[in-house]
Image: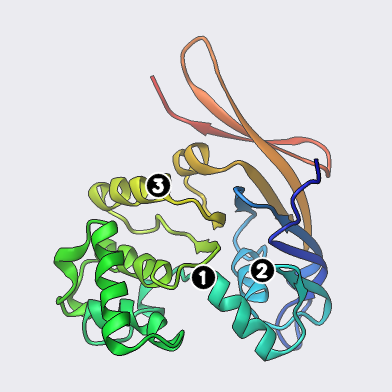
């Protein structure tokens, strides 16, 4: 049986900011259907930068980006990627800019060519599917931080992407919003790349890991085991040697 092709493949990526040492200096990544990859690394290791390279917001100075079987070289190539790989920004205020929730969620479908009536129906259906229909007519900037986060995810899902790129999706969520977000992710079929520091979240969702360290990438697998005191851990074994262990509290 033929192995599935990766949805995203990055090879030898070098990227950063002008007049500075590259943040990414030879990064490789492959995301396959059904995978939920967690990106690990210290602050400044390049996790958000890598998501922006995938979507073309930050250009790679060396290396290749291949998405959905095609090499990406031009802005037109990356515009097509951004339709199929939905990026949820770390700060929802960077993503939500329309007066009301329904307008924000309908914005993507409108840009995909749907009529206003079709786009608003898509937006309402998406909000209903996430049990967020009651927010449709709310003023976006008056939402709570957790509500903004959920709406920003709805705005991406309304475009029906094949891949989700999630930058710190649990930051600033209260317990209710955190629980709702977890339920939403449980039900989603898309492959994902998730920047996260939340050990509980990683333990629940991640199927593989990519460690960014000193500009390089080290892919690993995620597994859990329980000790006699029922304290679970997640291990990210990487090809640089050694092992990263993240404790996840439990009783």
Q: Quadrant of the C terminus?
A: top left
> As displayed, is residue 225 above or below residue 93?
above
Observer-nearest residue: 81 or 181? 81
Left or right: 169 as drawn, with respect to 105? right
Left or right: 47 as drawn, with respect to 73? left
Q: Residue 87, which numbered label?
A: 1
Image quadrant assignment for residue 106: bottom left
Q: Are marks 3 and 1 in contact (CB under 8 Å)?
A: no
Number of marks drawn: 3
Left or right: 166 as drawn, with respect to 144? right
> As displayed, is residue 136 above or below residue 221?
below
> As displayed, is residue 153 above or below residue 194?
below
The residue beneath circle 2 is 50
The residue beneath circle 3 is 187
Q: Earlier in the sequence, mark 1 or mark 2?
A: 2
Determine the secondary structure under disc 1: strand
Q: Nearer the viewer, mark 2 or mark 3?
A: 3
Q: Earlier in the sequence, mark 2 or mark 3?
A: 2
């Amino acid at each position: 049986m033929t192995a599935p092709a990766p949805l995203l493949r990055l090879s030898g990526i070098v990227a950063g900011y002008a007049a500075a040492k590259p943040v990414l200096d030879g990064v490789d990544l492959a995301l396959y259907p059904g995978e939920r990859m967690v990106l690990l690394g210290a602050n400044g290791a390049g996790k958000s930068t890598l998501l922006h390279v995938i979507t073309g917001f930050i250009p790679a100075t060396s290396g290749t980006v291949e998405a959905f079987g095609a090499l990406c070289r031009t802005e037109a190539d990356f515009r097509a990627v951004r339709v199929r790989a939905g990026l949820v920004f770390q700060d929802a205020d960077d993503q939500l800019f329309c007066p009301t929730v329904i307008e924000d969620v309908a914005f993507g479908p409108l840009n995909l060519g749907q009529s206003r009536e079709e786009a608003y129906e898509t937006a309402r259906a998406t909000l209903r599917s996430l049990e967020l229909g009651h927010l449709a007519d709310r003023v976006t900037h008056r939402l709570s931080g957790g509500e903004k986060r959920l709406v920003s995810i709805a705005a991406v899902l309304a475009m029906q992407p094949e891949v989700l790129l999630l930058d710190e999706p649990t930051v600033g969520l209260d317990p209710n919003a955190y629980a709702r977000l977890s339920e939403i992710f449980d039900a989603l079929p898309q492959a994902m790349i998730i920047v996260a520091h939340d050990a509980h979240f990683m333990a629940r969702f991640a199927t593989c890991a990519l460690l960014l360290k000193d500009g390089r990438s080290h892919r690993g697998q995620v597994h859990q085991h329980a000790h006699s005191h029922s304290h679970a851990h997640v291990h990210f074994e990487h090809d640089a040697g050694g092992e990263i262990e993240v404790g996840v509290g439990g009783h």
